[in-house]
Amino acid sequence: MATKVRADIDGSRVATPSNVPADRVYDVDMYALDGIEEGFHEAWMKLQGPDIPPLIWTPRTGGHWIATRGAVINEIYSNPDRFSSEVIFLPREAGEAYAMVPTKMDPPEHTPYRKVLDKGLNLGQMRKVEERVKAVAAELIDGFMQKGECAFEVEYARVFPVRVFMALCNLPLSDVPHLTELAEQMTRPKGDTPAEMGQSLEKANRGFFDYVRPIIAERIGKDGDDLITVMVNSTVNDAPMSDENTLGLISLLLLGGLDTVVNFLCFMMIYLARHPAKVEELRSDPLKLMRSAEEMFRRFPVVSDARMVAQDMSYQGVELKRGELILLPTALHGLEEASNPDAWTLDPARKGISHSTFGAGPHRCAGMHLARMEVIVTLQEWLARIPSFHLKDDDAPVYRAGIIAAVDNVPLVWDVAS
């Protein structure tokens, strides 16, 4: 269960605003979750105790609200008129430094930029590259299959989606280490204070802009079917995008392709390594495997971003003030029993799946079709070659919280003879 905040306030906490009732104050640090050594999702789910309200407030990370129920998370995502995307990262200093579009825009300004993203990432476009995606997965798995073991996060998760994405963008793989470091500082910024974390994110945001600026200049006005060329030559309201918004759009494209699926795959494979019966269920029914992707995303959400209160209002029994921030941990929707009975169990045949892993409303993730394909392809190519596997004994994964959760140390082993 989450702990109530002591009366004293140390240097990492802020004072409680007058509109926050004392019984809504809980000590929660989104970047250092209590109990995270037991698992990222397990740590977040401590906030769904029977006595914890649907909206609580923490003095950590600059002070903000946290939605703890699936219906509330979904409602906030779905209503940009009341809950704005003007600031979506915490702490506030980091969210104000974040300059990527259209994720920080609200409709109607957001709408034409989202159409540009959809132009390159729609389902039809993704189907055209499916064979290329399968080839990348197969090549990687063939490379370590005969060893009988791999460091999954290093040899596959951090390589497969990144190689796919860099190919789709026609960018050199030699740039991956630099871009990965920038992505790390965007989603899990370094710093001991909100100001320091804001400085880390601002530096990383500038790094993305500096990287994409010459690429954009080279591809504007050119023909090509790579994602960047398609997007920079698109129009918004029948006019070219501004330089600043083009930088933000292409930077967002890279950020989205370099971090989220990488970490999701690690969570998925940790679970499967611990549940061999689920592996066999997927292997024995190819159609069930293909349909399992949505259940995978429900079970292993990794995103915890925020929304800004757009105007003073009464909501969920408290008074919210314009400018306050509400964190939306998507784990608290997908793993909520009220939303998904027997939620901790991965059920490939589950009906009526409810989750916010891709967000909701106008900002629903533009990359969801690519993400689904990468998950299905990983399962198909892996299980065709490695039908049974488990985590190496006495070698536990290490979980890290943030805007996007991460996992280190995922050692998988298998019997080569099988």
Image (cartoon, rainbow, N blue to C red):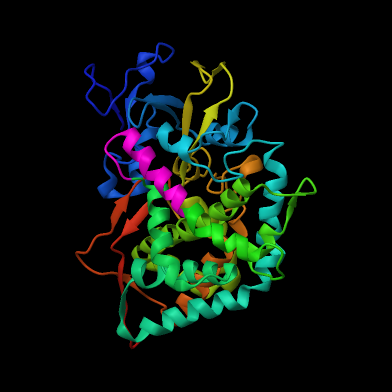
Numbered disc total: 0
Residue 51 makes an appearance in the image? no
Q: Is residue 8 above or below residue 132?
A: above
Identify the main secondary structure in magenta.
Answer: helix
The front one of 322 and 135 is 322
Residue 111, by quadrant, is top right
Left or right: 52 in relation to 219: left
Is 195 included in the stretch rendered in magenta? Answer: yes
Which quadrant of the rendered structure holds the C terminus? Answer: bottom left
Residue 164 makes an appearance in the image? yes
The front one of 20 and 301 is 20
x, y percentage for residue 389? 35, 73
Residue 94, by quadrant, is top left
Residue 167, by quadrant, is bottom right
Image point (67%, 48%), residue name: 114
Which quadrant of the rendered structure holds the N terminus? Answer: top left
The front one of 387 and 21 is 21
Is 278 included in the stretch rendered in magenta? Answer: no
> In the current view of this chain or complex, which residue is farthest to the left?
394
Image point (31%, 84%), residue name: 147
What is the span of residues highlighted in magenta in the rendered image?
190-207
x, y percentage for residue 175? 44, 68
x, y percentage for residue 161? 49, 67
> In the current view of this chain or complex, which residue is farthest to the top?
18
x, y percentage for residue 70? 52, 36
The front one of 195 and 287 is 195
Image point (43%, 32%), residue name: 92
